[in-house]
Amino acid sequence: MVETSDIRTGGAAESSEKSITCAVSKNEARPAAAYMCILAGGQKTIADGTIATVKYRIREGAHSGVVTVRVEDVLGVSTGLAKMNLDNAEGTITIR
């Protein structure tokens, strides 16, 4: 379970004066929770590192298992304002 306040700007983005704003994405085609976030601000380039962190909370009584977490459809812009498509990423959270 994630609240939008659990999604925060990571160190690399914060040091380049960016901030993140997220909202729940209401998409009936996706049964799982989805969030749409915008990271913006300032003119500084983001250095290598963490751009966002997400704090996950496991519901009381949750069953053991593996949950897949995806980051999809990421768009960015270069310093020259050229559109950049970033690769999708995927990971898992194991609940024990």
Image: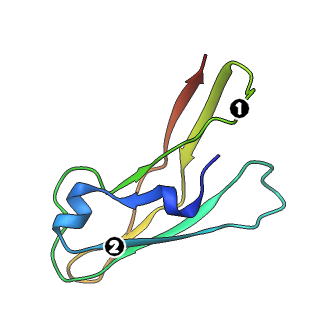
In the visual, does 50 lie left or right of 44?
Answer: right
Between residue 18 and residue 72, name the one nearer to us. Answer: 18
Give the labeled residue for mark 1. Answer: 60
Q: Quadrant of residue 16?
A: bottom left
Looking at the rendered structure, the secondary structure element under dot 1 is: loop
Q: Position of residue 50 (x, y in %)?
A: 28, 51
Looking at the rendered structure, the secondary structure element under dot 2 is: strand
Neighbours of disc 2 within 10 Å: few (<14), some (14-19), many (20+): some
Q: Position of residue 10 (x, y in %)?
A: 30, 56
Amino acid marked by disc 2: Ser
Vertical arrangement, residue 75 with respect to residue 52, above or below: below
Give the labeled residue for mark 2. Answer: 19
Q: Quadrant of residue 83?
A: bottom left
Please, which residue is most extreme toward the right here?
28
Q: Position of residue 6 (x, y in %)?
A: 50, 56
Asked if the residue under mark 1 is in contact with the one under mark 2, i.e. CB atoms within 8 Å, the reply is no
